[in-house]
Amino acid sequence: MIKFYYHPSPNPAKVALLLEETGLPYEVVPVDTRKGEQFTAEFRAINPNCKTPAIVDGEVTVFDSNAILLYLAEKTGQLLPPATPVARGELLSWLMFVATGIGPYSGQYVHFRHVAPEPKEYPQKRYQYEAERHWGILEQRLAGRRYMLGDTYTIVDIAVWGWARAVPFIFGDNAWAAHPSVKRLLDEINTRPAAARAEALKDRHTFKQEFDEETRRFMFPTLAASSTS
């Protein structure tokens, strides 16, 4: 059985959805990042980068959410586009676009908008611009097709779904006005029974909710250091 190292945040949510879509048996191993459990020796041996998600599938260990999506899709033969070079190129391109653009720029914008101390005008503007630019590219892509790769629901859509759930938190309450096609995709995936089961994982385990000094120390060590200097 697959061991799935999970915290309720965008990247683990992708893997949860794929596991539910494929029907693979798995065991959730909660990792409470607000308590610093990602830095234990046991978890560091699984993911040296100390981030969730990660999986252990027998002798195979995979970390980074999009790497896990690709691994599990290829393992099961599910949620992949047609087996053509053109489709494979699109799959890899858009999967990496989410991994290297959507996730990092959205996360950095959230950090500078909601967490970082002043002065933060320049970094906030920079990451806002890049986050909006990347989400704008997704909006353009989805404006002319049902799914990211056309008519086939794939792991690329699952990767987008993981972050699309957070768009109002990233950009504010009016965010969907600029991203109606992304919202359409999100709404469609949310109707899938697998999505409901993936979302329910966060309620089956207890995770720390407080954002206190302990949390700041574990999640934002540079921020914690600056507050005590």
Image (cartoon, rainbow, N blue to C red):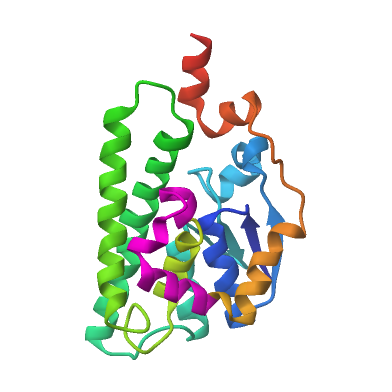
Which residue occupies the extreme top position in the image?
229
- Total tally of numbered discs in the picture: 0
Compare residues 40 and 113 and report the one nearer the observer.
113
Q: Relative to residue 65, is residue 87 depicted above or below?
A: below
**Image coords of residue 67 (percent x, y):** 43, 64
Compare residues 199 and 72 and report the one nearer the observer.
199
Residue 83: quadrant of the picture:
bottom left
Which residue occupies the extreme left position in the image?
86
**Image coords of residue 28 (percent x, y):** 70, 61
Residue at 26 percent of width and 48 percent of height? 130
**Is residue 150 shown to the viewer in this render?**
yes
Residue 33 left/right relative to 88: right
Residue 147 left/right relative to 35: left
Residue 3 left/right relative to 13: right
Which secondary structure class fits the magenta region best? helix
**Residue 36 falls inside the magenta stretch:** no
Residue 174: quadrant of the picture:
bottom left
**Image coords of residue 134 (percent x, y):** 28, 57
Q: Relative to residue 118, is residue 89 depicted above or below?
A: below
Compare residues 77 and 57 and report the one nearer the observer.
77
Q: In which quarter of the image is the N terminus?
A: bottom right
**Residue 180 falls inside the magenta stretch:** yes
Residue at 51 percent of width and 74 percent of height? 187
Residue at 69 percent of width and 76 percent of height? 25
Magenta extent: 167-189
